[in-house]
Image (spheres, rainbow, N blue to C red):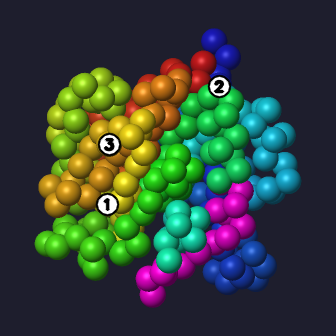
Amino acid sequence: MTQPLIGLTLDSEDPGGYSKFPWYAIRQNYCTAVARAGGLPIALPHEVAQVPDYLDLIDGLVVTGGAFDVDPALFGASSRHDSVTTKDRRTAFELGMVKGALERDIPILGICGGQQLLAVALGGTLIQHIPDEIEGALAHEQPNPRNEPGHHVTVREGTILHGICGATMLNVNSAHHQAVASVPENIVVNAMAPDGVIEGIEDPARRFCIGVQWHPEFSISVGDDRIFDAFIAACR
């Protein structure tokens, strides 16, 4: 069977470290997770003008995470928290890709910051800094390594995510200071952290449109692998 072509969004970095010039980056395990599930991963540079051409090529879209935030103006916020940092060209490209994929019903998997961007594209809003807005919040920027669990999430029964994972509780890793605050009525919240932070969303009207706040590419649980398996199956 032909492998579905899966586009993965890249992170972008300023000069320094790897190169004295601007450079792209992606963790290998994003690509490994796609390949393990049967997809053919390709990296998507931030060429906004070429969004339609990329959409013509790919069978599925993975919106990856990164140490940056969606501009609050994009979800109608009237103020901007001091902790917010943006990568405007990356966000413009990812929004173009997500909105185009939604129009074409191309399967989408949003991971961590990718879930937040997906939520905004679907008409939702974000918490700009969890410690300032959630009383008694968990350490969502976990102190232990990212390939270990940081906390657990409760998966809502009857959701697509629950059907995929086959569990009502998953141990997950956590590396974020923002989260989804609200989503439109047609979008389902499918997972929550013990402190009430939204950890997963889905659009049941689409072929596959799921965001998770954790990083399933680290394969911490069987549920993580099943998310990628279901995503690739939807892309065939």
According to the picture, the residue beneath numbered tag 1 turns out to be 174
Can you identify the residue that label 3 sits on? Answer: 189
The residue that disc 2 covers is 4
Residue under the point 19% across and 67% down:
138
Q: Amino acid at mark 1?
A: Ser
Q: Quadrant of the C terminus?
A: top right
Q: Secondary structure at mark 2?
A: loop
Q: Position of residue 13 (x, y in %)?
A: 66, 74
Q: Residue at x 19, y 43 (%)?
A: 154
> Residue at 22% of width from left, 35% of height from top?
156
Nearest the camera: 115 or 142? 115
| Few, some or many residues within 10 Å of mark 1 (<14, 14–19, 20+) | many
Q: Residue furthest top?
A: 1
Decide: is 185 above or below 138: above
Q: Does residue 111 appear in the picture of this structure?
A: no
Give the magenta-colored segment's residue range. 79-94
Q: Quadrant of the N terminus?
A: top right
Amino acid at the residue labelled 3: Val
Which mark sits nearer the N-terminus, 3 or 1?
1
Mark sitting earlier along the chain (2/1): 2
Instruction: Examine the structure image and report whether residue 189 is included in the region drawn in magenta.
Output: no
* Foreground label between 3 and 2: 3
Seen at 42% across and 45% down, the residue is 184
Above or below residue 198? Residue 19 is below
Q: In the picture shown, does residue 29 fall above or below 137?
A: above
* Percent position of residue 203, x then y: 45, 34
Q: Position of residue 219 (x, y in %)?
A: 35, 43
Q: Quadrant of residue 108?
A: top right
Q: Position of residue 103 (x, y in %)?
A: 67, 34
State the residue in front, 234 or 220: 234
